[in-house]
Amino acid sequence: MDKPILSKQAFWDVDMDSIDYNKDALFVMESVINNGSLEDFYSIRKFYGDKKISKTVIRTKELGPKEINFCCLVFKLKLQDFIYPIKKYPSTQSMNYYGA
Protein backbone atom coordinates (compact mmCIF):
# COMPACT_ATOMS: atom_id res chain seq x y z
CA MET A 1 0.00 0.00 0.00
CA ASP A 2 1.50 3.29 -1.15
CA LYS A 3 -0.35 5.55 1.29
CA PRO A 4 -3.53 5.46 3.37
CA ILE A 5 -6.74 6.79 1.87
CA LEU A 6 -7.69 9.73 4.09
CA SER A 7 -10.23 12.52 3.94
CA LYS A 8 -9.26 16.19 3.98
CA GLN A 9 -11.13 16.52 7.28
CA ALA A 10 -8.00 15.70 9.27
CA PHE A 11 -5.64 17.65 7.01
CA TRP A 12 -7.53 20.85 6.37
CA ASP A 13 -4.40 22.93 7.04
CA VAL A 14 -1.85 21.13 4.82
CA ASP A 15 -1.40 20.01 1.23
CA MET A 16 -2.04 16.28 1.45
CA ASP A 17 0.22 15.62 -1.55
CA SER A 18 3.20 16.98 0.41
CA ILE A 19 2.84 14.51 3.29
CA ASP A 20 5.46 11.77 3.55
CA TYR A 21 3.43 9.07 5.31
CA ASN A 22 6.53 7.35 6.65
CA LYS A 23 8.60 10.34 7.81
CA ASP A 24 5.52 12.23 9.03
CA ALA A 25 3.85 9.24 10.72
CA LEU A 26 3.38 10.96 14.10
CA PHE A 27 1.85 14.04 12.44
CA VAL A 28 -0.50 11.84 10.41
CA MET A 29 -1.57 9.87 13.48
CA GLU A 30 -2.12 13.02 15.57
CA SER A 31 -4.13 14.68 12.80
CA VAL A 32 -6.36 11.66 12.27
CA ILE A 33 -6.92 11.01 15.98
CA ASN A 34 -7.67 14.70 16.64
CA ASN A 35 -9.70 15.62 13.55
CA GLY A 36 -10.25 12.61 11.32
CA SER A 37 -13.27 10.48 10.66
CA LEU A 38 -13.71 6.92 11.86
CA GLU A 39 -12.87 5.75 8.33
CA ASP A 40 -9.62 7.74 8.51
CA PHE A 41 -8.78 6.02 11.79
CA TYR A 42 -9.42 2.57 10.29
CA SER A 43 -7.26 3.55 7.32
CA ILE A 44 -4.23 4.48 9.43
CA ARG A 45 -4.64 1.29 11.48
CA LYS A 46 -4.55 -0.72 8.25
CA PHE A 47 -1.60 1.28 6.87
CA TYR A 48 0.62 1.49 9.97
CA GLY A 49 -0.66 -1.37 12.13
CA ASP A 50 -1.57 -1.17 15.81
CA LYS A 51 1.96 -1.94 17.00
CA LYS A 52 3.53 0.99 15.11
CA ILE A 53 0.74 3.36 16.12
CA SER A 54 1.03 2.45 19.80
CA LYS A 55 4.83 2.87 19.73
CA THR A 56 4.58 6.19 17.87
CA VAL A 57 1.61 7.88 19.52
CA ILE A 58 3.20 7.74 22.99
CA ARG A 59 5.58 10.49 21.77
CA THR A 60 2.78 12.94 21.03
CA LYS A 61 2.51 16.46 22.40
CA GLU A 62 -0.63 17.25 20.40
CA LEU A 63 -3.37 15.00 21.78
CA GLY A 64 -5.71 16.07 24.54
CA PRO A 65 -6.92 13.94 27.45
CA LYS A 66 -9.93 12.56 25.57
CA GLU A 67 -7.83 11.46 22.61
CA ILE A 68 -5.14 9.95 24.83
CA ASN A 69 -7.75 7.97 26.76
CA PHE A 70 -9.14 6.76 23.44
CA CYS A 71 -5.64 5.57 22.43
CA CYS A 72 -5.24 3.85 25.80
CA LEU A 73 -8.45 1.91 25.26
CA VAL A 74 -7.85 0.96 21.64
CA PHE A 75 -4.13 0.15 21.87
CA LYS A 76 -4.06 -1.13 25.47
CA LEU A 77 -1.73 1.64 26.64
CA LYS A 78 -1.43 3.24 30.07
CA LEU A 79 -1.33 6.96 30.74
CA GLN A 80 2.17 6.43 32.14
CA ASP A 81 3.32 5.14 28.73
CA PHE A 82 3.05 8.63 27.25
CA ILE A 83 6.37 10.47 27.34
CA TYR A 84 5.09 14.04 27.60
CA PRO A 85 2.62 15.44 30.14
CA ILE A 86 -0.97 15.30 28.98
CA LYS A 87 -2.36 18.66 27.90
CA LYS A 88 -5.02 19.96 30.23
CA TYR A 89 -8.08 21.66 28.83
CA PRO A 90 -8.71 25.05 30.40
CA SER A 91 -11.36 24.84 33.08
CA THR A 92 -14.49 26.78 32.43
CA GLN A 93 -16.33 28.58 35.14
CA SER A 94 -20.09 28.49 35.35
CA MET A 95 -21.71 31.70 34.30
CA ASN A 96 -24.45 33.21 36.40
CA TYR A 97 -27.23 33.90 33.92
CA TYR A 98 -29.63 35.13 36.58
CA GLY A 99 -27.97 38.49 37.05
CA ALA A 100 -26.15 39.89 39.99
Image (tube, helix red, strand yellow):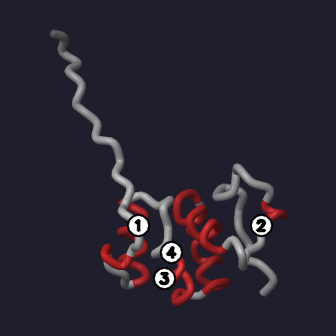
Q: Residue at x 63, y 66 (%)?
A: 27
The quadrant where residue 78 appears: bottom left
Q: Residue at x 72, y 57 (%)?
A: 8
> Which sits earlier in the primary sequence, circle 2 or circle 3?
2
**Residue position for label 2:** 19
Quadrant for the N terminus in the image: bottom right
**Residue position for label 4:** 57
Q: Residue at x 67, y 84 (%)?
A: 47
Mark 1 or 2: in front is: 1
In space, the residues marked 1 and 4 are separated at their CA atoms by 11 Å
Label 1 secondary element: loop
In space, the residues marked 1 and 2 are separated at their CA atoms by 24 Å
Residue 54: which numbered mark, if any? Answer: 3
> Closest to the observer: 56 or 38?
56
Percent position of residue 6, x then y: 71, 68
Quadrant for the C terminus in the image: top left
Q: Amino acid at mark 2?
A: Ile
Residue with the most extreme top position? 100
**Residue position for label 1:** 84
In space, the residues marked 2 and 3 are separated at their CA atoms by 21 Å
